[in-house]
Amino acid sequence: MPAPYCYLNGQLVPEREAVVPISELGTQLIYDTARTYGGQPKLLAYHLERVWDGVRYFGFDLGLAPADLERAIRQTLAANVDPDFVAQGGDYLISLKLSGTPLVCITTPSLLPLFRSRARYFRTGIAAVVARGAAAGITRISAGNYGGKLGPFHFRLHALAAQGEAP
């Protein structure tokens, strides 16, 4: 994957070159994350509405309208989304950091490192459920508990729960 870009105050710049002076952070910061599914933003209108509620509450002048912020998010995604990565089931976070100085920073990191860092928690949770198993009334593991995407593992987890086997 090429080096990631971020949107910083009106420009797409390589993340490793993005610099924000400490004086521009301000004392109030709005932070929001959304995510993509299939490389496309999920619930973006909801996130933008929530962010804009915060902008109004703090009285920030970002120097752009809500439609401009949405365009900036889509532009940042377009610069970073790798279609091959998405085709293999990969997706991205959409991370917004805003302040009234104004600061508008948008990053779109891959979810893969996040998922890898949390894998042991998934394994521990699955093992705990499986250990209790059908005898305790547990008959299935919901995909909703795992981001709604178990893919080829859905049936394996179902079988593990039924057999009382830990992964």
Image (tube, rainbow, N blue to C red):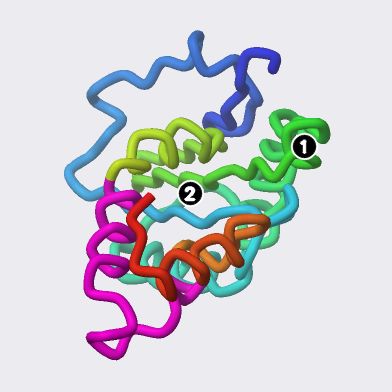
The answer to whether residue 107 is above or below residue 62 is: above
Q: Residues within 10 Å of mark 2 (few under 14, many from 20)?
A: some
Q: Which span is picked out in magenta?
A: 121-145
In terms of image quadrants, where is residue 118? top left
In terms of image quadrants, where is residue 54? bottom left
Q: Residue furthest left?
A: 27
For badge 2, the amino acid type reads Leu
- Residue 114 spot, x, y in % from top left: 41, 38
For badge 1, the amino acid type reads Ala
The residue at which mark 2 appears reads as 62
In terms of image quadrants, where is residue 76? top right
Q: In the image, what residue occupies the spot 41% across and 15% down?
A: 19
In the drawing, does residue 75 fall left or right of residue 147? right
Nearest the viewer among 107 and 11 is: 107
In reply to whether residue 157 is colored magenta, the answer given is: no
Q: Residue furthest front?
A: 163
In the drawing, does residue 50 fall left or right of residue 67? left
The residue at which mark 1 appears reads as 78
Q: In the image, what residue occupies the spot 65% across and 41% down?
A: 90
- Residue 129 spot, x, y in % from top left: 28, 69
> Is residue 148 shown to the viewer in this render?
yes
| Mark closer to the chain start, 2 or 1 | 2
